[in-house]
Amino acid sequence: MLKLTFITTTLLLFLGCVQDRTINIIEKTPKVLTSENIINIPIHIRDNGYHNFSTQIFTSQNKLDSFLATTKGQSGWNKKNNFLYTLKKQEIDFNKNSLLIYRFSEPSSSIVIATEVPTEIEKKITVKVGKKTPATMSFDMAYYALAYMVNRDIISVTFDDRDRNKTITIKKP
């Protein structure tokens, strides 16, 4: 009986060690998706008043209210009332979202700016900003802004205009 137990145990040991399996690890390329974690807020894309501030992230209603009060007293705007009204009427739950205002400049107001639908890969959003430069340009500085409500779980938003990328960190990874 001892011999039979020994032989059975030995056979099981050899059978367990003999099996040869290859495990293939396939790394999936993350899929680019249209992001549902960012919503465009429809402000005018170009206004002279945008020179009064830089890119900003608002994480509370108090910070936004303070910014709006400061903006209300500024001069040099084309459509200040529209800008203020649009931002005031947004219902932003600052527990879940932040307000991002991306501000940039171009050397001529004759440059046409357009954005594509934001895409997302692994909690990182990209907004492609297209520019069409005419053959002859005016010589006046143009100030632009894009406003978005961004989910706080997002790590960053990158604005890609092919010449340069500007990445704004929303949440530290």
Image (cartoon, rainbow, N blue to C red):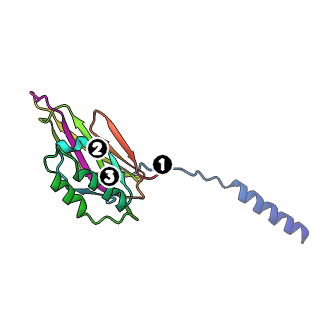
Q: Nearer the viewer, mark 1 or mark 2?
A: 2
On the image, the x and y values in percent for residue 101 come to 29, 50
Q: Residue 154 appears in which quarter of the rendering?
A: bottom left
The secondary element bearing badge 3 is classed as: strand
Which of 164 and 84 lies nearest the eye of the viewer? 84
> Within the magenta stretch, is there residue 99?
no
* Residue type beneath disc 1: Glu
Judge whether residue 156 can be spotted in this image.
yes
Are the residues flagged by discs 3 and 1 in contact, CB closer than 8 Å?
Answer: no
On the image, the x and y values in percent for residue 108 come to 15, 32
C-alpha separation, residue under disc 3 versus residue under disc 2? 13 Å
In the figure, is residue 62 to the left or right of 46?
right
Residue underneath mark 3: 100
On the image, the x and y values in percent for residue 40 come to 25, 56
* Residue type beneath disc 2: Phe
Residue underneath mark 2: 53
Which of 105 and 16 lies nearest the eye of the viewer? 105
